[in-house]
Amino acid sequence: MICIAIANQKGGVGKTTTAINLATGLAATGLRVLLVDLDPQGNASTGLGVNQADRAQSSYDLLVGNCALDDAVIATRVPKLDLVAATQDLSGAEIELIDYEERTHRLAHVLAEAPGGRWDICLIDCPPSLGLLTINAMVAAQSLLVPLQCEFFALEGLSQLLQTVDRIRGRFNPALSIMGVALTMYDRRNRLTDQVADDVRACLGDLVFHTVIPRNVRLSEAPSHGVPALIYDVRCSGSEAYMRLARELIARLPQQEKAA
Ligand SMILES: Nc1ncnc2c1ncn2[C@@H]1O[C@H](COP(=O)(O)OP(=O)(O)O)[C@@H](O)[C@H]1O
Ligand SMILES: [Mg+2]
């Protein structure tokens, strides 16, 4: 199982939208996917139609050792896509975990428990900060996917993120790679977003996925119906883009994962 953290300490850049729809796109290609919601806001869980009442065991319980991975896994209505949901408890985890042994490795140890062959790929939806939750995701992951919103300050904050990645590599996870940067909320009619996309590509080169996620109202409507956009409206431009992103990501996976 390859594990990819979807991270950017900025809020509202499309992490959760990417987590939900990329996970669904990957599942649609036949991969078995586990999505771990690591944001106390629990938007990925809500967006997949998992109500608070159905979140008896959550990512918080896993991090503090209240339950085993198997107890926290919820099958979603998307075939081949399972979820570990998030609850409000998670907002206290950053502080609570300070007293725990190996506090940066809690999620890594939990995911190492995953039975071999049950999932091909795990996506982790990170909160909008570089705190202990995101660090747990980066320690557990082999790779990072960074959504960048096509707006004027897109690159601001990226150096801080990359510094954190370097620190994690140095101290905990030398093999952590960056799978790619995904441009989100691209608006063809707005020349500024075009300019931003060009600048980001000039700066980051091949690291940037070829696929660009357009600004598309269907992507923002789908969560209120508790389904991924790919199910809400498979033909909308946002769904098509996430399906392309899923294929592009698969092409970037290490060879043995593709064969799975
Ligand atoms: N490509 C898009 N087009 C239109 N709205 C989007 C798009 N991506 C995200 N949104 C909306 O923008 C808001 C923030 O997105 P979200 O994925 O929750 O970001 P994050 O998880 O980084 O905070 C949400 O209301 C979401 O529905
Ligand atoms: Mg989010």
Image (cartoon, rainbow, N blue to C red):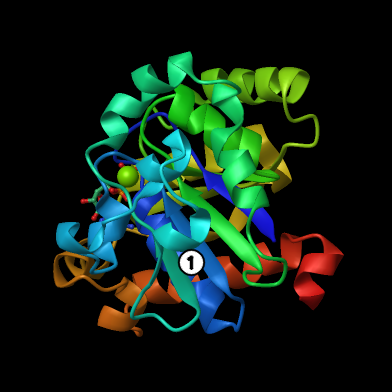
- Residue extending farthest to the right is 255
In front: 96, or 23?
96
* Res 233 visible: no
Q: Position of residue 18 (x, y in %)?
A: 42, 57
The quadrant of the picture occupied by the C terminus is bottom right
> Can you say whether 92 is above or below 69 in the image?
above
Which residue is nearer to you in this view: 97 or 193? 97
Q: Position of residue 76 (x, y in %)?
A: 36, 74
Question: Who's the residue at 64% across and 53% down the image?
Answer: 113
Q: Is residue 78 above or below residue 179?
A: below
Mark yes or no: residue 249 visible: yes
**Residue found 67% across the figure and 23% down from its top:** 168
> Which x, y percent locates residue 199?
54, 35
Q: Is residue 204 above or below residue 181?
A: above
Front residue of 163 and 203: 163
| Residue type of the residue flagged with mark 1 | Ala
Toward which corner of the image does residue 141 lie, by quadrant?
top right
Residue 220 position within the rendered picture, expressed as x and y whole percent measured from the top left: 22, 61
Locate residue 257 relative to residue 43 in the image: left or right.
Answer: right
Disc 1 element: helix
Q: Quadrant of the N terminus?
A: bottom right
The residue depicted at 45 percent of the width and 31 percent of the height is 133
Quarter of the figure with residue 21: bottom left
The residue labelled by disc 1 is: 23
